[in-house]
Image: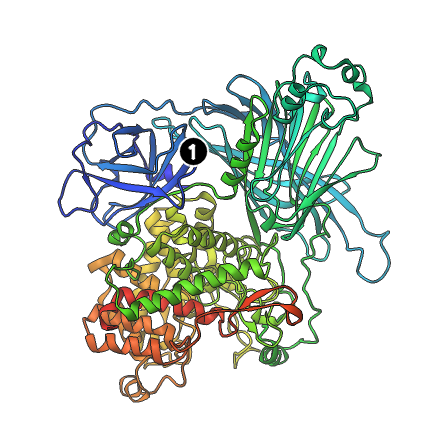
């Protein structure tokens, strides 16, 4: 994270802001106030949150600006911590991140005041107390204290409530793996070796601001070390702990990177475990709570006294059921109190979610005794609590628990002095994780055979490329400590809180006016024409259809949650989950941008959650973070990492840009953005054109002359460089230089972007003409894919960002491409000496025509854009724009079907509709 390096903005009080104007305004006032509201409903609790705000170019210089917070309609002061997450080229603030602490009062609206004049007094925030020694980090929020060792196997040594009760200890990571799978068909299971691992810390760091300490971040990096069996370290981890002032919760962002061997390391369990001290608590005052669906909870005591043949008394039963300390046992009916030794103590509980449709529950008195089944349910809430009425306890919750199956929650040793809660991110009750290729290569040993197979299954296979080595997965976990067992409604609320963590955001109209995340989208005007309203209804249909398909088709699971499918099989009434390149979408043709742009213009909570899950998946699972393919992503396929096409078009950071800034600079996403600075190094390992080269037998990769697609490749690199630059991340000057050099190089190509391919110098950033045109006479190589992975959006952002600094020749080259892609063959030939051939995806490319029309002020071109959108390919206005329910014997489970929907078309329709309405909406009629 680069917030401190960028300069933390001081916490300020609110005196002097009473007369500040609400932004936007046309004045040059010294202060502005921007309103932020909760995305969705106002939460019932606030345990602290972080959010981002955009600012127009030139408005506020970082070293001259202070921020402060107001709550509600009045002037209630809200302690605020602020920092810069992005800058405009002139050094003014483009995006800022803000944190507010926990509070009893939750306002519907907060207001952030930015000022260039220092306020007269400071906030009364109590802030955090942070102690950082050579051995450990300790953080006191005012409601809890957590201690983080800097070495060993324990990530959290103690969690203590404000009253001094230690309710959590020895928080550690656990991992299990095995060397083979038992159902491989050979009947030989004796040779399978099983291993146990635990966390081993490499580094623990803390980030906080002493002047305005509302939030502290502890980051622990390490790996899993074998404690049973002999095995190399396995699965690198990065675990981030977020603590807020006056908050009684800890948020954890848990990241794993797969660094094993797919045919040897079959992970069988991934867990997070905490000890819970219980000594001194009577067994009948110890409580277990496990969250079910829809706010439901399992209410259990270690030694239950309800339902017995003899009644201890209503007050006793009620107290135990409510998690309260029971009356003194001397006051109970003696027919019960004298026979307590005959009532079993339930030591262990286990909840297992092996699918998105159901979970099972069981409990036992101790190891070696039979498990007793407890009626289960459908979709567990993902929270477990263990504790006592007097000693307190700990609740642990996993966000999207049932969506990330196979998951689990175990409560163990509840009848002993120290119990445990284990959260299973991958349940040991499930089959071991099998990341081997799903087929044996099918005899595709040569490039010719692989290309021929591509013609039938659309899979681009190549042995050695179908590897999971380097992919990652991130989960979000919450810890809630208590001085005593909380009411059931509290735990139910916390379950909802963990699954939909509250987040604040500015209104779409304000975000749009700043142009801080593109000017190619716009909010929906109140006076939309009938034609525009029809398009809006189509966009809404597509969003809701994909949301429904996720739930109906069960697109869930440890590796799968967040992604969508590519193409539909109309005969089988299912998406083509098992057919080569038609299965998981892996960001093909930028549905990511469709989802985020749709949220930006509507502010809809359901769209935010949908886009967030998609961003978490596509940035982690579909991209390599270590290894030879680091920085590249994998093309769509049956397995997220299976296709041999590894390209930056999949990993391009523009897909995660909006999420990063709206979240106030999510540190894991920021890490993903920065690691792409080395993505161009992967061209030394992966030659994207290796299968279609005429000189395949003699070609040698040259770092000073790498084939670079001016659309697919350059758009990803340009996005990386722009984001690194505007964030002022560690290599921002290198990024700025390469961005400038490549733009000027493209402008120097006789045919600009129409050239299609250039020779990229990895060291200098210069792009030379392709090997087929060394004299730069002008090549013509236009692909329908070049502008389908964020190229129009990143160039539009560059124009907004650089303003008059955008090289004129570069813009001219781009506007030519935008104009001539949709022009006729004769026009193309007249301009370039050759036509572009037969092109597709014209509906999606209509947004290029619209961009050129806006930049050039050309109404005729604007009309052409709408003609391309409505009357070429893609989704036609005459389609049904509805789905049909299917049930009975023709499908496995009831589903809604729109057989005409394919994700390629949906993504491009969505982007083109949004951008055309924003740029040339006046020409629609």
Q: Split into 4 quadrants, where in the image is the C terminus?
A: bottom left
Q: According to the image, what is the colour scheme of the structure?
A: rainbow
Q: Secondary structure at mark 1?
A: strand
Q: Position of residue 805 (x, y in %)?
A: 22, 59
Residue under pointer 1: 46
* Left or right of 645 on screen, residue 743: left
Of 337 and 608, the residue lying toward us: 337
Of 703 and 330, the residue lying toward us: 330
* Left or right of 383 on screen, residue 851: left
* Left or right of 536 on screen, residue 428: right
As drawn, the residue found furthest toward the left would be 27
Judge whether 837 appears above or below 895 on screen. below
Residue 17, quarter of picture:
top left
Q: Position of residue 548 (x, y in %)?
A: 51, 60
Tell me the residue at 33%/36% (across/down): 82
Tell me the residue at 37%/51% (across/down): 724
Tell me the residue at 37%/26% (across/down): 210
Residue 15, quarter of picture:
top left
- Count of numbered badges drawn on the protein: 1
Q: Position of residue 688 (x, y in %)?
A: 51, 70
């Amino acid at each position: 994270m680069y917030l401190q390096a960028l300069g933390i903005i001081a916490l300020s009080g609110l005196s002097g802001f009473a007369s500040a104007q609400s932004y936007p305004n046309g004045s040059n006032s010294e202060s502005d106030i921007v309103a932020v509201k909760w995305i969705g409903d106002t939460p019932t609790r606030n345990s602290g949150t972080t959010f981002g705000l955009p600012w127009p170019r030139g408005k506020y210089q970082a070293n001259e600006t202070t921020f402060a917070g107001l709550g509600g309609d009045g002037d209630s002061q809200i302690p605020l911590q602020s920092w810069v997450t992005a800058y405009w080229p002139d050094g003014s603030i483009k995006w800022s991140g803000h944190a507010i602490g926990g509070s009893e009062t939750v306002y519907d609206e907060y207001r952030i005041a930015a000022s260039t004049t220092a306020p007269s007094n400071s906030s009364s925030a109590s802030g955090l107390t942070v102690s950082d020694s050579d051995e450990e980090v300790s953080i006191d929020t005012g409601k809890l204290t957590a201690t983080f060792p800097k070495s060993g196997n324990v990530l959290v040594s103690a969690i203590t409530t404000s009253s001094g009760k230690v309710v959590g200890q020895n928080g550690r990571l656990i991992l299990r793996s095995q060397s083979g799978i038992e159902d491989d068909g050979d009947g030989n299971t004796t040779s399978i070796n099983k291993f146990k691992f635990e966390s081993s810390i490499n580094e623990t760091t803390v980030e906080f601001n002493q002047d305005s300490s509302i939030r502290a971040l502890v980051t622990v990096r390490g790996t899993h070390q074998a404690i049973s069996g002999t095995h190399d370290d396995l699965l690198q981890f990065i675990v981030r702990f977020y603590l807020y002032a006056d908050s009684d919760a800890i948020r954890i962002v848990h990241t794993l990177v797969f660094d094993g061997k797919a045919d040897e390391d079959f992970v069988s369990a991934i867990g997070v475990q905490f000890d819970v001290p219980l000594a001194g608590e009577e067994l009948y005052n110890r409580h277990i709570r496990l969250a079910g669906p829809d706010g439901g909870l399992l209410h259990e005591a270690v030694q239950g006294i309800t339902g017995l043949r003899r009644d201890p008394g209503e007050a006793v039963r009620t107290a135990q059921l409510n998690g309260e300390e029971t009356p003194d046992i001397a006051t109970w009916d003696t027919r019960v109190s004298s026979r307590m030794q005959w009532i079993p103590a339930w030591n262990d509980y286990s909840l297992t979610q092996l699918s998105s449709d159901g979970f099972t529950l069981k409990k036992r008195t101790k190891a070696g005794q039979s498990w007793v089944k407890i009626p289960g349910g459908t979709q567990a809430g993902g929270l477990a609590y263990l504790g006592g009425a007097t000693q307190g306890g700990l609740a642990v919750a996993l966000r999207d628990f049932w969506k990330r199956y196979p998951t689990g929650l175990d409560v163990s040793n509840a009848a002993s002095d120290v119990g445990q809660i284990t959260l299973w991110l991958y349940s040991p009750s499930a089959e071991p994780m099998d990341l081997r290729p799903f087929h044996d290569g099918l005899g595709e040993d040569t490039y010719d055979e692989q290309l021929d197979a591509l013609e039938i299954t659309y899979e681009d296979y190549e042995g050695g490329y179908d590897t999971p080595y380097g992919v990652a997965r991130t989960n979000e976990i919450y810890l809630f400590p208590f001085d005593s067992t909380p009411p059931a409604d509290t735990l139910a609320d916390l379950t909802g809180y963990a699954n939909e963590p509250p987040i604040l955001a500015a209104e779409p109209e304000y975000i749009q006016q700043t142009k801080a995340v593109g000017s190619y989208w716009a909010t929906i005007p109140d006076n939309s024409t009938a034609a525009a309203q029809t398009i809006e209804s189509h966009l809404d249909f597509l969003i809701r259809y994909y949301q429904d398909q996720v739930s109906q088709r069960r697109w869930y699971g440890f590796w799968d949650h967040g992604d969508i499918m590519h193409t539909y099989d109309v005969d089988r009434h299912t998406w083509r989950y098992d057919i080569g390149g038609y299965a998981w979408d892996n960001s093909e043709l930028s549905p990511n941008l469709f989802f985020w742009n749709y949220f930006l213009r509507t502010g809809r909570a359901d769209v935010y959650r949908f886009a967030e899950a998609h961003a978490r998946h596509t940035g982690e699972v579909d991209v390599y973070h270590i290894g030879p393919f680091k920085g590249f992503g994998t093309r769509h396929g049956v397995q997220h990492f299976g296709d041999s096409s590894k390209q930056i078009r999949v990993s391009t950071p523009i897909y995660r840009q909006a999420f990063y800034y709206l979240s106030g600079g999510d540190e894991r996403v920021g890490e993903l953005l920065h690691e792409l600075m080395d993505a161009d190094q992967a061209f030394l390992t992966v030659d994207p054109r290796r299968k279609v080269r005429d000189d395949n037998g003699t070609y040698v990769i040259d770092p000073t002359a790498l084939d670079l697609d001016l659309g697919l490749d350059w758009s990803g690199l340009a996005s990386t460089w722009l984001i690194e630059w505007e964030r002022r991340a560690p290599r921002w000057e290198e990024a700025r230089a390469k961005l400038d050099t490549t733009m000027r190089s493209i402008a120097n190509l006789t045919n600009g972007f129409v050239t299609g391919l250039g020779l990229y110098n990895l060291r200098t950033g210069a792009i030379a003409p392709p090997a087929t045109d060394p004299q730069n006479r002008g090549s013509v190589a236009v692909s329908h894919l070049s502008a389908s992975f964020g190229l129009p959006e990143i160039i539009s952002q560059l124009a907004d960002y650089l303003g008059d600094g955008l090289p004129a020749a570069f813009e001219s080259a781009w506007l030519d491409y935008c104009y001539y892609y949709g022009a006729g063959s004769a026009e193309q030939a007249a301009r370039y000496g050759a036509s572009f051939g037969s092109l597709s995806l014209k509906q999606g490319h209509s947004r290029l025509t619209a961009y050129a029309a806006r930049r050039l002020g050309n109404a005729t071109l604007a009309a052409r854009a709408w003609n391309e959108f409505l009357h070429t390919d893609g989704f036609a206005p005459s389609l049904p724009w509805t789905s049909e329910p299917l049930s009975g014997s023709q499908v496995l489970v009831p589903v809604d079907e729109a057989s005409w929907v394919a994700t390629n078309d949906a993504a491009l329709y969505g982007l083109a509709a949004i951008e055309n309405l924003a740029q040339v909406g006046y020409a629609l009629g």
